[in-house]
Amino acid sequence: MRTNPLTTVRNLGILAHVDAGKTTVTERILYLTGTTHKRGEVHDGTTVTDFDPQERDRGITIFAAAVSCAWAGHRINLIDTPGHVDFADEVERSLRVLDGAVAVFDAVAGVEPQSESVWRQADRHGVPRIAFVNKMDRAGADLDAAVASIRERLHPVPLVVQLPIGTEDGFTGVVDLPRMRALVWADGADAAEEGPVPGTLREEAARRRRLLEEAVAERHPGALEEFCDREALTAATLTGALRDLTRTGDGVVVLCGSAYRNRGVEPLLDAVVAYLPSPLDVPPVRGTHDGAERERPADPAAPMAALAFKVNATPTGRLTYLRVYSGTIGKGDTVWDAGTRRTERIGRILRVRADRHDPLERAVAGDIVAVVGLKTARAGSTLCAPGAPLLLEPPGVAEPVVHVAVEARRSTETDRLAAALARLTEEDPSLAVRTDPEAAQTVLSGMGELHLEVAVERVRREYGLEVTVGRPGVAYRETVGEGVTGFVHRHVKQDGGAGQFAHIVLDVEPWEQDADGDGAGGGFVFRSTVVGGRVPQEYVRAVEAGCRDALAEGPLGGHPVTGLRVTLTDGQTHVKDSSDTAFRTAGRFGLRDALRASGMILLEPVVEVTVTVPEDGVGGVLGDLAARRGRVTGSDPRGGAVVVTATVPLAELFGYATRLRSRTQGRGTFTARPTGYVPAPAAVVR
């Protein structure tokens, strides 16, 4: 019986907090699989996946990079994702198309703020994961403490399958608990030497193997049956149960190692092959067509369906990254863009290795490839067979929270700047460009200071433009603190011919529901309680559309309005002059005037800041956070340093990195992640 080739494909991402070692893990995987012939190092700027000049200058991953390699007869399509919070949208788009992931944790720090964020992102997408506790050779490395932080902060069931041999600088290998064998790496060796479990560790290894068997049997019916019969599990049963628990999300396999020293990466690759799902192990992709939900199986013979998740718009052409969910794409094929409802032609298909590519004649279900020739497809576009249309759900796009004004230094280069910014937003949907008519400025918005710095630097380097950048600002919101009831608005217009007439009565109130964790109710709800047909249903929909139009600019400062519920309670129509247009206009101007009559609150974005500082610098850091309107929520001693967490308004954090370095002689570091919006001080206006 012939094996389906899709069973040997693994599509996975590497997820972690910044500086946990994701890129080093990826580089060692490429080296061990023979994809590269030299170990790339982040500190030397020689990595394959961090190929952008800014990534090498800054020593961090900024752009998700796709690579393809082979291990033990399996094709591994791997995406190295950014760890910095400003580039979380890159992670979101990657997770949308992945079947599994490796979450990398620092053996000293354990779960860090962005580790938690990317873990929650993977939870939302239902992506199975295995965990790799990296940097076991560092001073203070502790596998048990790292596993405890995973359990306490992320709430999975960690299933630890390895026991480290040696500690800190003496870390030389691991005991493989399912097979009860030792894997030891000699200095400078690429491959592990397999042998029996060292005598000093046999008792501890047996104890941990027993704990692993009990944890697995407790959650897996097949393993429980064997455990009850034999009071132990065979290696085959244990491995099969770990695979099932990983794919259902009922458990997370935990391994350890030191990627920098090339220790523990081979077992990690074996675990990827053994535990993470193939395209056949995940549910068929779901999409819609003509309002009906459809499924497409991971079958090369099925109608083609693919999702574009990344676009590189270079001066020489567009490179579009695709996850092929079903069917086959061939070079020269015509495909249908279900979003724009137009056809596109596939010029070339490429197997990706970061910034290098190998040509392919075709790509099949389960593949992650790049294609050349698509002119209008964006990140989130669905490409499908013209004869079998299907629209897949695109990745979500986060709303920008920081903005800067940018302008070309030479007036003759204004058009070139506009084209460069358009190309950036095409590649990165979390960037937004708008024109401020009052200040006659171009405003670039993004997810944070670093996000905007990177975008502006790309304009300078890649497009050769000199630009002037204004001081960063934050994206405020407005909400209703105290609403109004029975607010009457009449729209009457008569200027010859058919006139416009609409009479509406609105109630406006705060909306407290916050299912998305958005802050201040997050969103807008419209409902109608009109009875007796005084406002026909088609006009009710027009009033709702007008109200949504009014949300774009609030009365306090022209910021978007959120967190309110509007109820249409009454109204009147005119036999001749009432229309959709009249009621939409009434809805827009009626809600605008109702908001002016309400008690409005200005909202500002806040972030959770995690500052790691030497013990002798804690006092200065706490004082500085208080001066920035920060609210300290925790303080945790950790290996000679103190980790301080606080909630701080985003507007107060501009320039904080420089300030922190000066206060701590360069020894302090911090990370920040958005947590929502809160009322700004003294911002209730009547």
Image (cartoon, rainbow, N blue to C red):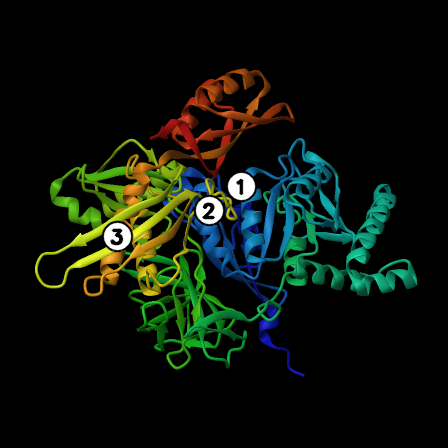
Query: What whole-number distance in Å separates the C-alpha atoms at marks 1 and 3?
Result: 45 Å
Query: What whole-number distance in Å separates the C-alpha atoms at marks 2 and 1?
Result: 9 Å
Residue 670 in sight here: yes
Q: Position of residue 125 (x, y in %)?
A: 55, 57
Q: Locate the N terminus by quadrant.
A: bottom right
Which tag, 1 or 3, sits closer to the chain's start? Answer: 1
* CB within 8 Å, label 2 to label 3: no
* CB within 8 Å, label 2 to label 1: yes
**Dividing the picture into quarters, in which one does residue 266 lie?**
bottom right
Q: Is residue 203 left or right of residue 532?
A: right
Is residue 315 positioned above or below 607 on the image? below
Is residue 419 positioned above or below 334 on the image? above
Tell me the kind of residue under disc 1: Gln
Q: Position of residue 645 (x, y in %)?
A: 55, 29
Q: Nearer the viewer, residue 127 or 598?
A: 598
Is residue 485 positioned above or below 360 on the image? above
Per the image, the residue denoted by label 1 is: 114
Per the image, the residue denoted by label 3 is: 586
**Dividing the picture into quarters, in which one does residue 458 lie?**
top left
Tell me the kind of residue under disc 3: Ala
Q: Position of residue 421 (x, y in %)?
A: 26, 48
Q: Position of residue 112 (x, y in %)?
A: 58, 38
Residue furthest to the left in view is 496
The label number, if any, that marks residue 169 in the structure image? none
Residue at left 52%, top 19%? Answer: 622
Q: Is residue 680 left or right of residue 620?
A: left
Which tag, 2 or 3, sits closer to the chain's start? Answer: 2
Residue at left 21%, top 52%? Answer: 491
Residue furthest to the bottom in view is 1
The label number, if any, that marks residue 88 in the structure image? 2
